[in-house]
Every structure is written in structure tokens, then in C-alpha cells.
Amino acid sequence: MYNRVILAEKPDMGENIAKALGMAAKKRGYIVLQNGDVVTWGIGHLIRLKTPDAYERFKEWTWEALPVIPEKMETEVDPKKTEQFNVVKELLAKSTECILATDPDREGEFIGRLILQQCGYRKKWKRLWIDDLTEPTIRAGMQRLRDSDEFTLLGDAAQARSYADYWLGFTASRFFTLVARDATGGRVSLSAGRVQTPTLRLVYDRELAIEKFTPQPFYQLVASFDTPKGSYKGQWYRTEDGQTVNRFEDLAQAEAMKKKVSGQGGTITSYTVKDVSRSAPQLLNSSALKTAARKNLGFSTVRTTGALQALYDKGYVSYPRADSRHLSANKAD
């Protein structure tokens, strides 16, 4: 009999927690702690929603079977992860209490609750809610565990999002596929979804805009000014209807202006002296980091996401899916 089972989302996260709390023995699929607790983990999504093919009513792709909304949403263990699921289930059956330590967000809450539900776990549990995997944060989080009831609405929101994605994705995919098959007589298959479809539309609209774009040449006039204290460059401009215009649409006009000012003297009519302070740049959140990695390193979103997750698992960065660009007090320390 074990005291408590600490259920992490992934193996690396589980090992970080175990190291912070004091490892005693590493077993297959779990780690025994010095105080008699055990740390185990999912492998991401151990549990998944059954596909429509698992329901008798939705096995055939027909108009009569739409919309794809099962009366009861059923779950199953991912066949590739059965061994780890059995480890978790057995540990929970032998424990006095569970501490859910999945990622501190909606998706992490849903993943943890699905595992407990599939294991038949009916007791209350505690929640380890931390946003980085440094040892001080883990130990401090274990001293202020929160009740599972605090996160019921978060779990419900995650479940609603998951169900909505399922209903919309499978219904829309089958609907458009049936429309295409009726129109063409072929065995075409189309895919649609809550995120996929509008994202595809954004890409499509952008591609059309690029195809229709007609570049227009313009010309700018830049001159070098020599003064007793040094040289500097200045750019020609004019004010038009309250707006600054610094380009010529016509090459002849640009050449004429260049000829007019070349070799001529100038007069400084006004200048402004001011102190400028620059704040330190903000820290990067996930979105900002992906943008910077793409611009500076040429990384794809998938590559950046994988690297960021690996850094988080090793305790080098705070929780990667947090929107905030600020550190909490415990992380700053």
C-alpha cells in the first residue's frame, strides 16, 4: 500500500517531481519516493475519445447518420499506451490519495481527469498547481496542494471544448465528404474542423492577396551632409495634407530633385534634443518565442514547440503555454 500517488502528465515531468521530493527507487512506469509516496505519469493522452466508427449508429458515412453526436461520449485507452495505463491504475488502487500533477492549464486538467475516470478512481484528489519545474517551486507547491473541487469548472470547460471539437470536426468532415461524393460520384474524402477550417481560410485569403498584388516602383532620395563636427545622412521628404511623404513615384522627378540639391549648402532650421530611455525587453511567452524563432532562426512552429517543451521538462523555462510575459515571485527568486 502506498501513501499517495502523484500523477504527472509525462515521464520527464514525473522524474523532475521525484527528484525534487527525494527519489528512493525507480521502477518500470513509476518512481518510489523516500517518504513512501510514488510518482507516475501518463504519456500525454493515455485516454482518448472513441471514434465514430466505434458506435453502431455512426459506422456508415450516410446523411441519416448526421450530425455525429453520440448520446454518451465513450473513452478508451490508447492501445499503444496500455502498459503505462495499467501501471497507473494499479498504483491508484493501492494508494490512499491521488495528487494530480498534470500541466497547469485546461488541457492538462482534462488529461488528468480522463485518466482518473478511466481508472475508476472515485475519491477526491489534491491538485499540484505549479508553473515551472524547478525544485523550490515543486516543493513549495507540495506544501500548498489545492482541492480538486477548485478545478471542476476548468475540467468541465476542457471537456466541453473536447466534445465540441469532436462533434464539429466529425460532422463537418462527413458532411463535406458526402456533398463532394454526391457531386462527383467519386470516393473523395474531405476534412474540416473548428481550428483547421478557419485557419485554412486565412491561408487561402493570404495566398490570393499575394497573387493579386502588383508591385509599384518608387524612389527615395538620401543625401550626405558634411559639417565641422562630422557627417550625417538625411532623407528628402515633404508634407502633404498633414502626412509625411518620403518617396517619389516618378523616377524623373527624383532625378530632377537630386540634380537640384547636389553640391548645394543647407541650413538647419530647427532641431530637438531629448533624452530617451529604453526599458528592458519583455520576457517571451510561447507565441512571441515562436515568432522570434521563425524570424531569427528559421524554425518552424513545430520545431520551436518541441524545443520549448524539452526545455520545460528539464526545468530551464517556466510553463510554455502560459500567456503571461511576466514572472511570478517564486520563479523570479
Image (tube, rainbow, N blue to C red):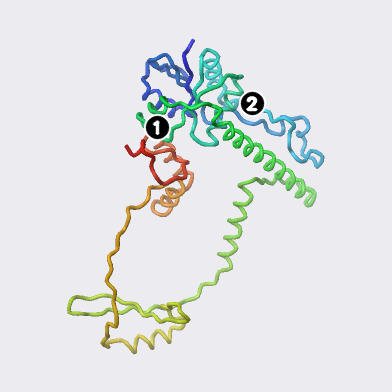
Picture residue at 79% right of the left edge, 38% below the top: 65
- Quickly name the residue at label 1: 133
In the rendered image, the residue lying farthest to the top is: 1
Q: What residue is shown at x 30% (from left), y 86% (from top)?
A: 262
Is residue 220 left or right of 43 when viewed as pictured?
left
Vertical side of 92 occupied by 270: above or below: below
Q: Give whichever of 2, 59 is nearer the camera.
A: 2
- Residue 68: image quadrant is top right
**Tag in front: 1 or 2:** 1
Q: Amino acid at mark 1?
A: Leu
Crowd class of label 2 (few under 14; some 14 to 19; many from 20; radius 10 Å): some
Asked if 60 appears above or below 120 in the picture, the reply is below
Badge 2 marks a residue whose secondary structure is strand
For the residues labelled 1 and 2, the Cα–Cα distance comes to 30 Å
Type of amino acid at the residue the image marks with label 2: Glu
Tell me the tag on residue 35. Answer: none
Answer with the quarter of the image where residue 210 lies.
Answer: bottom right
> In the orientation shown, which residue stands out farthest toward the right?
64
Lower position in the chain sequence, tag 1 or tag 2: 2
Judging from the image, what secondary structure is the residue with disc 1 in?
A: loop
Residue shown at the point (49%, 23%) measured from the top left: 99
Q: Toward the viewer: 161 or 12?
A: 161
Task: Find residue 172 and report its horizontal and vertical position in percent.
Answer: 71, 45
Pinpoint residue 67: horizontal percent, then vertical percent. Answer: 76, 40
- Disc 1 crowd rating (10 Å Cα; few below 14, some 14-19, many 20+) is many
Q: Are marks 1 and 2 in contact (CB under 8 Å)?
A: no
Location of the C terminus by quadrant is top left
Q: How far across and down, in percent of the image, does residue 133 sit?
A: 39, 32
Q: Does 268 sit left or right of 95 as displayed?
A: left
Residue for badge 2: 76
Asked if residue 75 is positioned above or below residue 326 in the image, the reply reads above
